Image: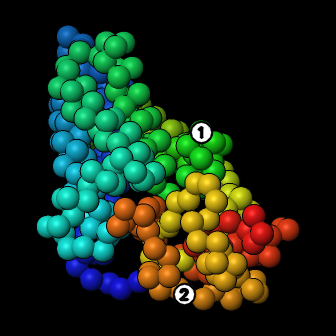
Amino acid sequence: MSVDGLWIGQVAMAALMNVAFAFAVGSALLGAWLANDAKAKIAPAQPAWLRAQRSLLTASAVLVLVDLGWLLYQAASMSGVALPAAFGIVPTVLSQTHVGYGWSIAFAGALVLPGTALTSHGGVLRNALLWLAVIAIAAGKASLGHAADAGLASAAIAMQTLHVLVTSVWGGLAITAGLIVLPALGASTARGVLIRTASQVSNVSLVAVGFELLSGIFAVRHLQCHAGFGRFVRGDCVEHVGPCPDPQAHARRTCAGAGRPEPLSRAAAPAPHGIDNGRPYLRQRALSRGACDGRCLHCGGCPGA
């Protein structure tokens, strides 16, 4: 893996996506907790509630923009072209890769969030749309990683979605409450609201951390046992459906011995449609698992399959 401007930009976009989503989730929770106090006749909590609403709107708008930027960097990384030329690759990424499918789900949810943030009242429909959008974003983000190896409708995707959600709840509450919302409850008349909201933040964060640890353990076990490190090459993961398109490569590129990873050049794993069809992390030579003596580095299948 080479560290260049494209890689740095991709990592920066991914980090901004996570931060914006965490801010949006934390702001939504704090806004819901403060809504009733903000509507009271004497409402010392109203400034904090307004901050939460503005934070939700800002984070939602940033998330939409950063999602678009990340997709462009991802297309450039998967196709091996310069960033300006990646515009022409984006339709192929969206229509023919699991990255495109997952991104589309997450982006659809991101488009709904600003609309819910602009709605001042907290009706049932608005709240339902908001949290459905949050779940869609988490599910889309979960589909971009290792969990996609088990298929879109799988326990791995469900657990990774939960992992993304609870991580965003924990981190979002911590940064949004500490930096934006709770400082607005510093008046003596808002002391009761401050204490109650801080307790809610603490309790929910504690539960979120517990679920994060459990879902994280499941994710590690899935990576080690289910995926078996089975389709790893240098470059981008090659999705494959059906028989290996190169039977000779299927026999030639199997892992003769388990254990030591061996990098493989990008040229050794040709990608359909001119792009590498999968995730942008460094893959290495397959480790043998179970009855399979090693997986084909071209299609991910077992020898003789």
Q: Is residue 257 left or right of residue 75?
A: right
**Who comes first in sequence, dot 1 or dot 2?**
1
Q: Which numbered marker is on residue 153?
A: 1
Amino acid, disc 1? Ala
Amino acid, disc 2? Pro
Per the image, label 1 sits on a secondary structure element best described as loop
Q: What residue is at 63 percent from the left and 51 percent from the top?
A: 150
Q: Which numbered marker is on residue 263?
A: 2
* Vertical relation: 39 (above or below) 208: above
Q: Position of residue 57 (x, y in %)?
A: 19, 36
Q: What residue is at 55 percent from the left and 43 percent from the top?
A: 152
Q: Position of residue 134 (x, y in %)?
A: 39, 35
* Vertical relation: 56 (above or below) 278: above
Per the image, label 2 sits on a secondary structure element best described as loop
Q: Check whether the beta carbons of the residues at disc 1 and disc 2 lie within 8 A of each other.
A: no
Q: Position of residue 8 (x, y in %)?
A: 27, 75
Q: What residue is at 27 percent from the left and 67 percent from the top?
A: 76
